[in-house]
Image: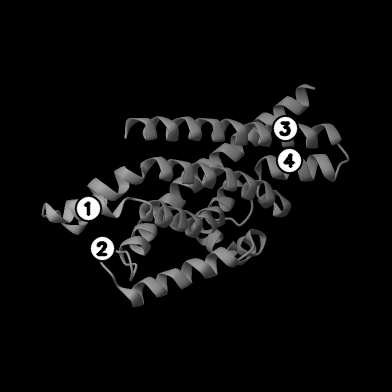
Amino acid sequence: MEQIVTLVGSATLQTLAMVFLSTLFSLILGFPLGILLCVTDPVSGIMPKPVLNQVLSRIVNILRSFPFIILMILLFPLSRIIVGTSIGTRATIVPLSIAAAPFVARIIETSLKEVDPGVIQAAKAMGSTNMQIIVKVLVPEAMPSLVSGITLTIINLIGYSAMAGAIGGGGLGDLAIRYGYQRFRTDIMVAAVVVILVLVEVIQFIGTKISSRLMAKR
């Protein structure tokens, strides 16, 4: 029993580290991209740029179409360049971040497009610049939806991190496969799955609460 607790505890910390850092980096990559997709939209954008919007949209669609396992294998060389290895927790953060970034971009774009156009027009009428509209109108007005989207991203990353265990990614997925499935330790595999389920439930609960409170303050 003590061995199971030790193994699951260590793997849980690895998963939390992977998910936290990959969420951070995917937001750094995806947030600006999502804003660009929104503001350059040829129909509803505040800075319509059809060509740029189409190019960005195609890039996002291509990256989103890659199955994560294949993307992770393709990014082995990049992981080796950035973190010095292609196996383990550190290496997995690179493909996790890149896989989640286009998903984040679409979530940001969709959330910003839900903002009432009347609010944007009012800001323009008061002489606000495009940057002021983005920072002071679009993002604050879309915050409840943004929080829900980021929560969904974190949950997806937990699933991705578990899949990464199939090719030596570390964390709970790696524990369930190497120690549970391959060594016929059903107890370890079940414990890893239960922890993953608990993490998802806790994150979803927190995200829903924050989003609801933001919505109530509007």
Dot 2: few (<14), some (14–19), or many (≥20) neighbours within 10 Å? some
Which numbered disc flags the more N-terminal residue, 1 or 2?
A: 2
Residue 143 falls in which quadrant of the image? top left
> Which residue is farthest bottom?
51
Q: Nearer the viewer, residue 184 or 39?
A: 39
Q: For the residues marked 2 and 3, what is the alpha-carbon distance in whole angstroms? A: 46 Å
Q: For the residues marked 4 and 3, what is the alpha-carbon distance in whole angstroms? A: 12 Å
Residue 200 in the image: state x and y as whole percent.
61, 36
Label 3 secondary element: helix
Is label 2 in contact with label 4 (beta carbons under 8 Å)?
Answer: no
Is label 4 in contact with label 3 (beta carbons under 8 Å)?
Answer: no
Residue 46 in the image: state x and y as whole percent.
25, 63
Q: For the residues marked 1 and 2, what is the alpha-carbon distance in whole angstroms? A: 9 Å
What type is the residue that disc 1 sits on?
Ile
Is label 3 in contact with label 1 (beta carbons under 8 Å)?
Answer: no
Is label 2 in contact with label 3 (beta carbons under 8 Å)?
Answer: no
Image-based side of 175 in relation to 103, left or right = right
What type is the residue that disc 2 sits on?
Ile
Q: For the residues marked 3 and 1, what is the alpha-carbon distance in whole angstroms? A: 44 Å
Residue tagged 3: 194
Is label 1 in contact with label 4 (beta carbons under 8 Å)?
Answer: no
The disc at residue 175 is 4
Kindly identify the residue that appears in the image at 47 percent across and 30 percent down: 209
The disc at residue 133 is 1
The disc at residue 46 is 2
Residue 173 falls in which quadrant of the image? top right
Which numbered disc flags the more N-terminal residue, 2 or 3?
A: 2
